[in-house]
Amino acid sequence: MLSQGTGVVVLLVISLLTADCIATGMVDNRLGTCVTSRGRVADLTYKNLTSFPFLLPNTTEYLDISHNSIQSITTQAFPRLPLLCFLKATHCGLTYISPSVFQHTPALQVLDMSSNYLRIIPDISLPQLSILDLSDNLYEDYQLPECFQNLTNLQVLSLGSKAALSVHLNDFKPVMNISLQHLLLGAGVRWQLYESGALGLLSMQKLTLFVNFCGHISVLDNLFVDLNVTQVSALKFITMFSDNCNITGDPFQNLKAMPYVRNLTIEHTWINSSFLEIFLKNVWLSSIQDLSFVNITYNEDTPDGLQFQFHPVNHSISLRAVTFDRVIHYQYRYPIFNMSFDDVSNLNYVKFSGSGMNILPCKILTTLPTLETLDVSDNLLSDLGFWWPSCSYTSVFPRLKHLLMSKNRFSSLSFISGQTHEMKQLESLDLSFNSIYLDKRCTWPRHLIELNLGNNNLGNSVFEYLSPNLERIYLSKTGITAITQENLSRFPKLTHLRLSSNSIQALPEQLNGPNLISLDMDQNAITTLSRHVLEGFPKLQFLKAGNNPFICSCDLHWFLTDLNKSCLLDWPLDYLCSNPVKFAGLPLSEYKTSVIACKTWLQATVAFSVLLLVATTLGVLFYQLDGVWYTKMLWVWIRVKRRGKKHSRLLKNKSFSYHAFISYSHQDANFVSSQLVPTLENAGVSLCVHERDFVPGDWIIDNIINCVESSYKTLFVLSKHFVQSEWCNYELFFAQHRAINIQQDYLVFILLEPIPTDCLPKKFLRLRSLLRQQTYLEWPKDERKRQVFWASLKSMLRMADKSVVLRDVATDLADTATLLNHQF
């Protein structure tokens, strides 16, 4: 029904919606702002606890003990949690909280103790506290303790009790000097008394009142007077009128005298038609710019039916935004508003959500010339329901920039793309949560730069149906399994890309998005992130990659150490290890790996350096501890062991009278007679010494030959005096000749002092050769080493009985000798 210059706005409400009151528990979720790791979160809800848990890690930052049976919290029972920043204890049956219970939680920022049985508002003195919810308890008044004046950082305060029926002047005085962002009061009951000035003491930006004003309009009038003093800018009324309330008078007449109120919300309230007409006329005359009806039930009680008459006003209306979210119409009929659209010519935001609307009225398409944002989400609209064929129009939303149509029944993307050409200023389109399918080629307008197709089953081919002019593309949960450079190359202006909740397993390293600023890849199947991928996005400022099954390995080392985490919007709470099994569930922020463990070249460098240092250290110790000398002895012993079996066959048929014949210079006789001979003979070794055992009267050469041949070994005591002795040269010659004939290690040299082989006379050329090839024992100057020297020599020469032939001893010699070997 239209008159000249008027239009009809028809609210099509065809489905009965239900909603619950959301007055309680209105604490902002600040989990991500103060909790640094999921490993520091303790969720103890529904654990049948009867007392406060005491054995908690002192690193706990978030604690939820809701839905237990804890009647009191005392200082003695409360654990020391110096890092605790978020505490929630709702539905616990709490009746008492000790005043000093929070003295060991100085970092507490969020405290929610709503929905309990507290009979007084507890003393709380936490300078860092920013959110406090004590709503839905049983205290009888709103008198705040004096210690609340210490809550200097408090931003959100929620109070409410069904037993508190009055508000007194000084109830909120302790927080009068604290600038609150949001104050929530009430528990859905009527206030019997409100003393003027009680809220006028406060400084706040937003006030939410969960109070029933039915029959107590005077209380509301006094409130409006005080709120005007506080200069509050946003008001919300929850359940302000009970069902079937008979409203008399004009409860909102004071709105016209409140120039600071810009936002007004009516939520979860029964509204009849008579009240609605009065209310809207007051809004028309007020300074309100944003008006919202949320989860309301509309009841018709006017005699004229559902038709409202709004007469033109003689001043401009401040209203810029109107929201109808979840509206239930009691009679299943739709109200008609007769009004001039000139009165709302400045309206730039309209939302009809949750109304069951299936057809958009024709007049809305053309009679809102200033509309910039239209939200018709959560309805029953389809392609032809929004673009109704019966409508005739020349222009559609001439200034519309943002169109939100999520949670409807839209389907054909090609049809929608063609219709958007009619909206000449359209920049963003939201088609998420619909039934969109890809049928044929799409023709998008050049001015459309943002498109949301989230929660539609589209697949990898969706990129082929999008406009190359798009700057922001949102494709969350669309069935995409891979993203390629070919996909990105289609959108040279792309700045924002959202691919959350898909099945993407990896990002190719060759991806290149020169203008990309924001990328959402969370909740996919990505196991690692390559440094080269992000290098392809030089302008990237925001990244979401949490809730992926990350493999904690060296591939993520750069991500943990080099990447600036300030660009990660969901760090660190949503980043967990999934593999290997030993790290499963570990927060990525707590996964530790070193540069050395992940850099092969660095490992090789460090290993070489360590080995070089160890080798140098061992070399120095080896030299300092005479390792060279001990090594020589060990080498000789090994050689003797290897050659023992070979020589045993040669010695099998031999017999000897002496263990050894000693050849030495008479100038070394003191060493031989005082040390060598006594030591060996005391050990049971039989020796042939020329001064003692040569046969008198025989030629000296014969004596030498006989002694050499009847001895198992010939023992030469070498010194500078030895090389100057003529007889020593003879003894050496015959002994060497015998050794050659029997092909065995017959000669043993004891070196009393160093004799450079190059300095030997030419007549001792044979000795020079032997010293380069033959085994010899060096007489040690160190007393400690002489025990090894004697043990080696005795092991070689000892026999059980010197009167018995040495056949058996010679056979076992290779196994028992411990000589050490040296070769020049």
Image (cartoon, grey):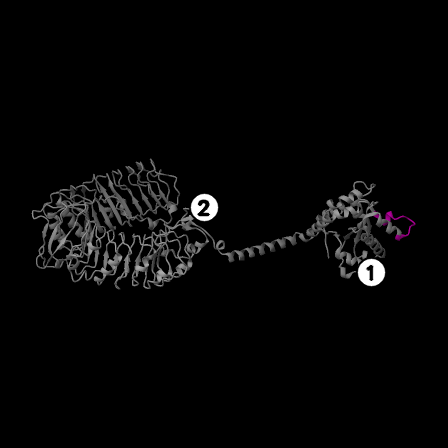
Depth order, front residue of 209/479: 479
Relative to 64, is 627 on the left or the right? right
* Quadrant including the C terminus: bottom right
Does residue 657 belong to the magenta stretch?
no
Secondary structure at numbered mark 1: helix
Report the magenta residues as a range. 688-701
Q: Where is residue 682 in the image (x, y as percent from the top left)?
A: 79, 43
Residue 811 screen position, x and y as percent: 77, 44
Disc 1: which residue? 763
**Amino acid type assigned to the residue bearing label 1 in the image:** Lys
**Residue hosting label 2:** 582
Closer to viewer: mark 1 or mark 2: 2
Q: Which residue lies furthest to the right in this view?
A: 697
Query: Between residues 411 and 203, which one lies in front from this camera angle?
Result: 411
Residue 91 image-quadrant placement: top left
Q: Counting other residues with Cα less than 10 Å from the Cα at mark 2, is it few (<14), some (14-19), or many (20 or more)? A: few
Q: Which residue is drawn at 45% across and 46% down?
A: 582
